[in-house]
Image (cartoon, grey):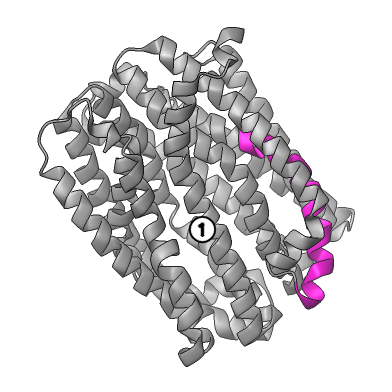
Amino acid sequence: MAVTSEELGSQDIKKLLIKQAVPSSIGILFMSVNILIDTIFVGQWIGSLAIAALTVVLPITFLISSLGMAIGVGGGSVLSRALGSNDREKAKHVFGNQIMMTFILSMVFSVLGLIFSEQMLLLFGAKGAIMKPAREFFIPIIISVPFLALCMMGNNIIRAEGKAKFAMVAMIIPAFVNIALDIIFIKLMNLGVFGAALATSISYFMCFVFVLWFFVYKSELQLNARHLKFQTHILKEITELSFVTFSRQGVVSILAIILNHTLYFYGGEHSITVYGIISRMLMFALFPILGITQGFLPIAGYNYGAKNTKRVHESVIVSIKYSAILATIIFVAILFFAQSVVSVFTNDPKVIAETPNALRWVFAASPIIAIQLIGAAYFQAAGKAKKALLLTLTKQGFFLIPLVLILPHFLGIFGVWIAFPIADVLSTLITAYFLKKEMNIKPITTTDGLL
């Protein structure tokens, strides 16, 4: 049974978190399995070079589509607090402004991506033999990115309403569509990388159809034309918090550029394939922690808007506790089964030899990342844009990028892999400091969101 927005402020936190996090986790699991199987099909049916091509292209498309995710998360925080303070008219205006922002921005950036496709692919590391399959994959995907952006925005609003099960279905649909079409286009019709791109593009559109259906027939936020009109103060609120998420994705894209060029320099095309496998495993293996983080956001945002300090603090503690237990189990599994995992993706002996140890190092600090993820999410849910931005950028921006640039000069390709756990530890320490300081503040005042 779906949770209503009012229940976010009244149900037991542990039960509520489970109700919100389990559907979110299942949705992320299916999305991760989709990307994972897509990579396995591409690696086994086309070749390891095609995995490298996907590793180059996906950061570009996710950068553009993350405009929708950023607007969804940032606006979702504003919307959750509006619902918490029982201001439904503001919540509708927020949602209407989010739709228009996402549509306009994603269309503009998609057109620019088409115009400058060659330059973008080169920038993101499509060197040597990688360029041809990267180009085949890029064009169909970039055309479908506005649909993906609207899906990512809408999915966050569905969760902000407390309808986590519908958000889960929105993530499951493209997974099934993509896997089925992969088999048809790649295996049966032998369309290669273009077939993989076509399958992914159609899956994005089908997700959009479901999200549109939800907001027309199931949502509490029934809009009319006036809600779509831009309002300056609402745009300002959405933009400040959306900038946090988009900055994170922007830094992730910059990291992808640096990683792809560094990996190519020190290890060639096969090292980019290695990271392609690892990046897919990061999303797949950590799905329950990401699900808890997404489930936590509307709970914290609603109760912050209702000025219920006790429930906000309890939601932080419970979310960190559950996430830490799950992350530890995941790390132990990776430690023992890395070799078996890698052999599923490819038969390339170079990739199979290098990937297991690299995978173990990248996951080495995963038991402590719960503090980092929930801590940054708390400040975003509370509307504290500056602190949220600082903590969001610590891992990739302040630590991982400099470490990836410096360590390989002394340690070669191993320097890239060891940079990940070092960045995790440092960013977790900083997040823990700010979060501990915040949790000692008892009252929630009306000016907190400005700090």
Image quadrant in which the N terminus is located: top left
Q: Is residue 422 left or right of residue 99?
A: left
Identify the residue at horizontal 44%, vertical 63% (top origin).
Answer: 396
* Residue 24, x across and y down, in percent: 44, 39
Q: Give the image quarter of residue 100.
A: top right
Does the stretch in magenta take in 149? yes
Residue beneath the point at 21% across and 28% down: 12
Count the numbered circles shown: 1
| Residue 13 picture quarter | top left
Q: Secondary structure at mark 1?
A: helix
Residue 202 lies left or right of residue 362; in this view the side is right
Residue 87 screen position, x and y as percent: 35, 12
What is the magenta segment's predominant secondary structure? helix
Magenta segment range? 127-150
In the rendering, at what x and y percent does residue 167 appear? 51, 32
Q: Is residue 271 visible?
A: no
Q: Is residue 46 above or below residue 237?
A: below
Residue sitting nearer the eye, 36 or 420: 420
> From this viewpoint, which residue is outermost toward the front?
232
Q: Mark 1 sits on what residue? A: 251
Residue 112: within the magenta? no
Q: Name the kind of residue labelled 1 in the image.
A: Val
